[in-house]
Image (cartoon, coloured by chain):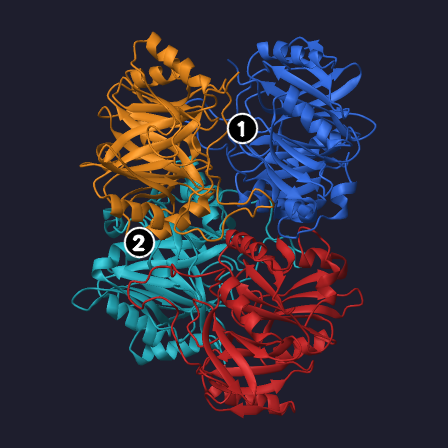
Chain colours: A cyan, B red, C orange, D blue
């Protein structure tokens, strides 16, 4: 018996300026650097949030352009890699297998494959455990020496695909994700889909756009006050805030969007609700898409659809 | 493949004054009454929280004394009832099986058995789904006509047992719960254990005390401000507040404790952290038990250990 | 010895649809209706916030167009009306005096005059006291039966003037307000001014625009969570939200803007800081006007400058 | 025309261990050290909160025992010192006058006198202005490099007196404070009184106890979340928390109490309401004293009445 896919494990992000981005992600966002590595001539910096126990949740990868290299989901057991390899091969999706540490420091055993939308996806098991930054005995609720925003953990990733329905079908049928919410066009086709494994409104979401694109990745914050304090920190450091603290209709979550120094969109997210496996999906109509995305403004700024990586 | 036990489904609570308690749970706590039933001469009132989709999460049962009749956990699939029946019988625990609606209105198919501590536990599947109080299309984040405190859902149950270690061993070995935190005496034996299935710090917890006793059951609140507003509502209605809003060391959660009109302890809870199945349990020492339970005061009022139901 | 002007007492607002606006201000915003009156053929509805003690803080006045009829400030003593009459006449501003109840039900003794920008201003003393909605002995912190947003009190008014400097000079020299913050153009002239009597960042503010115009009036909220909950209520009722919850640079305050059913802009405001009479004013430069007004977005939507009443 | 007494300016506190207390007040509480001074053989450390503009609001004074040396209130104009000297001498209270800087670095011109309860009170004007920690042009809402709790300002002082009525009569009649709330015994005499000049529920309060005693002094926090975060910081540093975050009935404020390293009680306070000079005082009865002080628990721990300095 296995839980199969548990949650989003990490994103690997392309950044043209590795040092600038490392400074931003550690000093402003407040992640912790856990390793640096050069492999096949590519420099990478490994980061984790303070309350995560494993080696990394964000990998910065030196590259000519910004965007998403790949996203990885944690599976509960090593045997799940075989299980999904079989399922993927049964639908003719090529799968590559990697031994522990083969993909980088602290890395677990993994498989990789492409979605119909051309996104590179990894399933991983057995990441090196570094512990969160608290003692195992009589821990305080939070380290006192955190810097910057310091979200406790990575939350979800949001990508774009030309064919949203094919994307969600792949995640549902093959990877056993569950649909929580969707935005549906007047002609009935899916404009956006929100999919989960962790009993939250989304571990991954997808909206209509260019194949392979990243819309944003999001970190969890503990509450609406934390989102506001974070916006103060972003403003203080001159970070470009895309969308100031507000609320989503979809997920009911609280949010703020902003850009890292090279143009990757980040989100801070909190709220949501508990999702049982038998959760009946919520549908948003095309007319209410504005409200679905930004519940208070009821309209979406143009950047939301046109700026991605 | 099944997730097995997903979360706490409901508690059935004994109350000597059914009408008074119904008024309290609906008007002050703000649950929704979904049914009334008389079965075997026993009056019961069925309640749910607004954001729960199933028929009930709290059942009030007319009885001469207060306390816990039983607690029920939701399983992901009907086959899980067979699976756990086998596991229970393998360790010589008698299991009774009930058809859907046999145990009451809206009730699912269920099995029942006793823990070593004499608590009656139910696993249930296929509860009647009533929906939360929002539309399935373009829903607002929250109904506007809620009354009282109106927590979105039940969170966990906290019981007492003479042999805490036997209790947690039973939940871990047979029911496949996972230990997140424990309080350990200087002589090494477990004084309290916190156990989860829902990737949160606890779905059930147990502390040293009389077998079969209920310490409290808890509802989820969205944030620390909600806990405070709830305390205002409790104070306004003259509810006896046991512990005003504060923080736990264990679970890192925010809390307030209070008593229903017949003496069952309720809690409002928020916070906590994400728990992977490979989470390494946290240990609190006997010296730090005060801090473990009430992080700010560092000491536990006597009522906490001596008043239960 | 007198404190002279204490704070904003009320605004009288023109509304083409009195019943619709009364419904909005009582059911959505959650003010309390205290009186209705017809005088000189004009229908008016009198409203107060729950924690205000006096007869009214918002008066709705049936009129063909929306906008501000007048604003009134409370003075500490009846003699202050004479004091300011003398000061106004000394600078050749005509003053009209009104006996108690002459201007409407519950009204105090008052003087009225025009600012250089053509705004009608009233100073008032001896309003009828209705009490807030709590008992004078052992009161709870808040009534439990409030509806809608229910801000505790009116906070400030924000108007427009062609000549901001003349406006602030009049308020400072004649009415003894104090400048807390200003936005100054590159050529050195004042684009906006924030003026206080109540030791808060502003009781009245003015920005460049048409003489006599109202930009908005604002109610106090207790915290950032209250602002969010209010935005949920506004969205639920289909109120047009102009600016979702965000932060000002000027005043450091938290805010959300929205429109009443006929187009008068309302604000909910909280935060700010304590202002001593010897407070040294803060200056914002023209380049940073965006940040001054909306600290996170750093730019002001066009509506902010062009839509007023 | 003068506002006379504006607010609490500072407290001077006796501390047997000056270095330990300086470390606590700067590193845990997060005040800023502005000066050190030896005068008449007594070492003193001068501290201010970050958002205060003047030289100091807390003075630590090396002394054999802990407790209150004196409290000082800010007056609006130098002439107010003469005004109150006359009023004090008219009721036969001896007054001492001090030139600027005579009492210490940054100090203003001042008068000092004793209350009937034997508390030393100072009125002061013309303190040296250091500015808050933000620029005068385009300031961010808050410095980013604050340490510890970092409340923005001192709020009020709470003392004890054998004769509460004589104490409040002195503050009302001579110093022109206004009564906002009182706790009254069944026999009609005042057990506690809350007095203001700053339009808030209290600048000073007094409760029955030994003459000359200090119960606590309080710093302002911006909201209930700030109080909670502060409690985390206190707990982390092992500070003795007297009362965890809760709510007062009197003042409606949110609070947490704790002790400095030598036993002086500190409070963090937020909330309250606006007070006009014509505010009608609220009365709490002896039976409801518990609720008046701790609204949720309805009872006062014994320490509250017996531990003071």
Residue A49 lies, in percent from the top left, at: 50, 53
Q: Nearer the viewer, residue B56 or A185?
A: B56
Vertical placement of B133 versus B78: above or below?
above
Residue that mark 2 sits on:
C237
Q: Secondary structure at mark 1?
A: loop
Q: On the picture, is C148 further left or further right than B222? A: left
What is the crowding at mark 1: few (fewer than 14 residues within 10 Å), some, or many (at least 20)? many
Chain ID for label 2? C
Q: On the picture, is A155 further left or further right than C213? A: right
Residue D92 lies, in percent from the top left, at: 74, 13
| Quadrant where the C terminus of chain D is found in the figure | top right
Q: Nearer the viewer, residue C20 or A287?
A: C20
Q: On the picture, is A304 further left or further right than D84? A: left
Chain ID for label 1? D
Vertical placement of A232 versus D129: above or below?
below
Q: Is residue B151 visible in the rendered structure shown here?
A: yes
């Amino acid at each position: 018996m296995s839980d199969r896919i548990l949650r989003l494990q990490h994103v690997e992000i392309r950044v043209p300026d590795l040092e600038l981005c490392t400074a931003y992600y550690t000093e402003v966002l407040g992640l912790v650097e856990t390793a640096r590595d050069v492999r096949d001539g590519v420099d990478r910096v490994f980061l984790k949030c303070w309350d995560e126990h494993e080696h990394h949740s964000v990998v910065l990868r030196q590259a000519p352009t910004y965007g998403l290299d790949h996203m990885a989901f944690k599976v509960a057991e090593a045997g799940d890699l075989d299980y999904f390899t079989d399922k993927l091969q049964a639908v003719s999706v090529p799968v590559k297998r990697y031994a522990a540490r083969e993909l980088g420091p602290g890395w677990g055993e993994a498989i990789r494959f492409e979605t119909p939308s051309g996104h590179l996806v990894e399933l991983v098991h057995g990441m090196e455990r570094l512990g969160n930054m608290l003692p195992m005995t009589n821990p305080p609720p939070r380290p006192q020496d955190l810097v910057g925003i310091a979200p406790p953990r990575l939350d979800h990733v949001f990508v774009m695909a030309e064919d949203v329905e094919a994307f969600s079908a792949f995640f549902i049928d093959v990877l056993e994700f569950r649909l929580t919410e969707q935005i549906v066009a007047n002609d009935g086709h899916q404009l956006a889909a929100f999919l989960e494994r962790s009993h939250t409104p989304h571990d991954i979401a997808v909206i209509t756009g260019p194949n392979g694109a990243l819309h944003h990745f999001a970190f969890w914050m503990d509450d609406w006050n934390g989102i506001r304090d974070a916006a103060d920190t972003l403003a203080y450091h001159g970070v470009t805030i895309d969308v100031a603290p507000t609320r989503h209709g979809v997920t009911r979550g609280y949010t703020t969007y902003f850009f890292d120094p090279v143009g990757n969109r980040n989100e801070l997210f909190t709220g949501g609700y508990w999702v049982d496996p038998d959760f009946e999906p919520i549908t948003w109509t095309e007319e209410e898409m504005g409200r679905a995305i930004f519940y208070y403004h009821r309209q979406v700024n143009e950047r939301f659809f046109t700026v991605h990586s």
